[in-house]
Image (spheres, coloured by chain):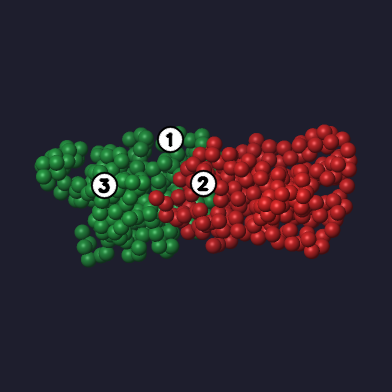
Chain colours: A green, B red
C-alpha cells in the first residue's frame, strides 16, 4: 500500500545489548505511514526495547533506525513522536489535569489540548484526581493522554490497553483508527493476540528476532489458520522445524 | 533551553509541593523549631548569635539536598524522566526548574526562621539582611544541584538518603565550626579548602556576626556560586537522553 511513499520507520540491522545479553539480534523492518502497526510477541521478547530504540532513548549496539526520514533521537523528532511507556509515566502527586498542562507546556501544545485529550481517553471525570489515587486502567489512560498532546506524526504505544475493560478497549482502538485515518502512524505493542486483528500490519517478535512481518490476513493465509493465536503457534513450530 | 519550559517545570514542581501539605509544613517549620530549641538549649544570647548563622547556612542546604535527590530519583524510577528526555525539554530546563522551585521554598524557609530569630529570639544582626539571604539562597541552590548529581548514583530511596550524611558531615566537620580551619592538620585544611560549605559558612559568619562585606565575603560568595554552577553541570551530565 502506497509503496512510493517513504516509510514512517525504517529499521536495518538493529542490535541492542542490555547488560551482558543481546536483546535484539539485528532486526530489519519497515513501518508504513498512516497505518496501525501492531508489535506482537510474548512478554520479554524485546518489544519495549525496540520501541525505546525507535523513540531514541535506547543506547543501541548497531544498525540504523530512521524515523520520519531522520535518524532516531534527532532533536526535531521530539515534537513529532508521542510516546506512551508501559509503566504509566505521570506524576502521582499531581492531578491528571496538572500533568497534562505541564507536558502540554513542554511540547508547546495549544492550551486547549489537555481538555481535548482528556475527552479522547474518557478521563474527564478524573481530571482533578491525583495520579496516585487513580486505578490501574485510569493511570494508563492518563499516560496515553499525555502522548496524544500536540500533534504527533508518530504514536508509539507500549501496551496501552492493559487492564482496560472491553468497552474502553474498543473505544481506544477506534480512536487509534481515527488518528491513523488522519495520517498519523501508530506503532502499538501488545501481547494480546486478539488485538492484532485491529492492526493493518503485524510485526511478530520472539526472543529478539522477527518471526513474521505481514498483514493479519496474509498471516492467516500463510499459516492456514483463522485464529491469530493459532497462527503465532504455527509460526513458532515452523521456526523450530527449520 | 527555553524559558517557557523552565518556568513550566518550576511551576510543576511547585504544584507537586503544594499537593503535599505535610512536606511543605515540615520544610518550612522544622528549621524555625530547631532554631527555637537551640536558643533555649544555649541560653546565652552571645553564644546563640554565633550558632544561629551556622544553622541558617546548613538548613537550606540539607533540606534541599534531601528533597531534590528524592524528587529526581522518583523522576528516574517513575518513567517521567524518560518521557521528558524524549521531549523537547533540555537538561538545563529541568535543573533550573528544580533550582527555581526549591529556591523559592528555601526563601520561605529562611524567611520564617529569620523572622522568628530576629524578633522573638532577639538575634542581633550586625550585618546586612540581604547578605544573609543571599548566602542562604546560594546554599539551597548548592543543595539542589548536589542532590541532583548524587541521585544519579542511587538506585533506591534508601540509598539516596544515605548520601545525605556522606555529603553533609565531612563538610560540617571540616567547615570550621567545631575547630577553626587554620588549626586543623594540614591535610584536613587542604580538604576543607575545596569543600564549598567552608566558604558558605564563612560568608554567613561575615554577613551576620561581623557585618564585614569586604573582599573575603565576595570571594566566598564567588566560590559558592562557582560550586553551584559546577554541580549543575555535573548534574546535567547525569541526565542522559539515551539509557542502556
Closer to the camera in the image, B56 or B181: B181
**What is the quadrant of the C terminus of chain A in the image?**
top left
Asked if one can make out residue B93 in the rendered structure from this viewpoint, the answer is no
Which residue has dot 3 on it? A208
Neighbourhood count class around disc 2 (C-alpha, 10 Å): few under 14, some 14–19, many 20 upward: some
Q: Position of residue A52 (x, y in %)?
A: 37, 51
Residue beneath the point at 24% across and 56% down = A28
- Image x and y of residue B21, in percent: 65, 37
Query: What residue is shown with label 1?
Result: A136
* Disc number lying in front (2 or 1): 2
Q: Which marked residue is nearer to the observer: mark 3 or mark 1?
A: 3
Asked if disc 2 and disc 3 are in contact, CB closer than 8 Å, the reply is no
Residue at mark 2: B153
- The mark found on residue A39 in the picture is none
In the rendered image, residue A117, in percent from the top left (x then y), is placed at: 44, 48
Q: Residue B210's image quarter?
A: bottom right
| Residues marked 3 and 1 touching at CB (< 8 Å) | no
Pointer 3 or 1: first along the chain = 1
Q: CA distance from mark 3 to mark 1?
A: 28 Å
Disc 3 packing (10 Å; few <14; some 14–19; many ≥20)? many
Q: CA distance from mark 2 to mark 3?
A: 30 Å
Quadrant of the rendered image containing residue A9: bottom left
Residue depicted at 28% across the width and 43% down the height: A45
Relative vertical location of residue B10 with respect to residue A67 in this rendering, above or below = above
Q: Residue at x 11, y 41 (%)?
A: A241
Amino acid at each position: 500500500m502506497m509503496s512510493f511513499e517513504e516509510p514512517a520507520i525504517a529499521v536495518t540491522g538493529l542490535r541492542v545489548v542490555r547488560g551482558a545479553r543481546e536483546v535484539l539480534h539485528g532486526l530489519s523492518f519497515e513501518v508504513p505511514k498512516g497505518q496501525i502497526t501492531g508489535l506482537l510477541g510474548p512478554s520479554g521478547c524485546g518489544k519495549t526495547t525496540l520501541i525505546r530504540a525507535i523513540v531514541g532513548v535506547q543506547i543501541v549496539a548497531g544498525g540504523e533506525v530512521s524515523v520520519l526520514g531522520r535518524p532516531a533521537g534527532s532533536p526535531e523528532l521530539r515534537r513529532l513522536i508521542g510516546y506512551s511507556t508501559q509503566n504509566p509515566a505521570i506524576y502521582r502527586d499531581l492531578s491528571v489535569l496538572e500533568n497534562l498542562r505541564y507536558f502540554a507546556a513542554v511540547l508547546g501544545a495549544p492550551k486547549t489540548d489537555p481538555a481535548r485529550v482528556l475527552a479522547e481517553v474518557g478521563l474527564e471525570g478524573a481530571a482533578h484526581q491525583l495520579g496516585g489515587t487513580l486505578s490501574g486502567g485510569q493511570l494508563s489512560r492518563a499516560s496515553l493522554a499525555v502522548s496524544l498532546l500536540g500533534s504527533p506524526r508518530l504514536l508509539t504505544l507500549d501496551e496501552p490497553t492493559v487492564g482496560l475493560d472491553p468497552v474502553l478497549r474498543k473505544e481506544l482502538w477506534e480512536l487509534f483508527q481515527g488518528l491513523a485515518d488522519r495520517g498519523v502512524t501508530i506503532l502499538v505493542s501488545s501481547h494480546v493476540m486478539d488485538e492484532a486483528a485491529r492492526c493493518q500490519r503485524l510485526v511478530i517478535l520472539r526472543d529478539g528476532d522477527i518471526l513474521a512481518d505481514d498483514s493479519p490476513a496474509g498471516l492467516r493465509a500463510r499459516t492456514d489458520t483463522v485464529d491469530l493465536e493459532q497462527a503465532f503457534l504455527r509460526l513458532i513450530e515452523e521456526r523450530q522445524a527449520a | 533551553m527555553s524559558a517557557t519550559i523552565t518556568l513550566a517545570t518550576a511551576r510543576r514542581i511547585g504544584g507537586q509541593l503544594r499537593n503535599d501539605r505535610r512536606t511543605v509544613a515540615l520544610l518550612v517549620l522544622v528549621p524555625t523549631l530547631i532554631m527555637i530549641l537551640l536558643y533555649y538549649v544555649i541560653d546565652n544570647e552571645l553564644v546563640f548569635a554565633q550558632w544561629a548563622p551556622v544553622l541558617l547556612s546548613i538548613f537550606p542546604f540539607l533540606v534541599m539536598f534531601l528533597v531534590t535527590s528524592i524528587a529526581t530519583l522518583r523522576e528516574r524510577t517513575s518513567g517521567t524522566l524518560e518521557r521528558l528526555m524524549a521531549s523537547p525539554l533540555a537538561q538545563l530546563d529541568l535543573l533550573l526548574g528544580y533550582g527555581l522551585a526549591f529556591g523559592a521554598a528555601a526563601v520561605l524557609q529562611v524567611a520564617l526562621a529569620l523572622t522568628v530569630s530576629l524578633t522573638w529570639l532577639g538575634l542581633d544582626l550586625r550585618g546586612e539582611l540581604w547578605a544573609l539571604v543571599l548566602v542562604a539562597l546560594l546554599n539551597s541552590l548548592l543543595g539542589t544541584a548536589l542532590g541532583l548529581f548524587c541521585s544519579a548514583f542511587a538506585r533506591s530511596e534508601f540509598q539516596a538518603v544515605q548520601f545525605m550524611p556522606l555529603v553533609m558531615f565531612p563538610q560540617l566537620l571540616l567547615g570550621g565550626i567545631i575547630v577553626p580551619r587554620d588549626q586543623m592538620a594540614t591535610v584536613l585544611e587542604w580538604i576543607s579548602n575545596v569543600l564549598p560549605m567552608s566558604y558558605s559558612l564563612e560568608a554567613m559568619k561575615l554577613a551576620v556576626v561581623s557585618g564585614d562585606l569586604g573582599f573575603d565575603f565576595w570571594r566566598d560568595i564567588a566560590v559558592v556560586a562557582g560550586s553551584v554552577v559546577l554541580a549543575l553541570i555535573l548534574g546535567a551530565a547525569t541526565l542522559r537522553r539515551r539509557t542502556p
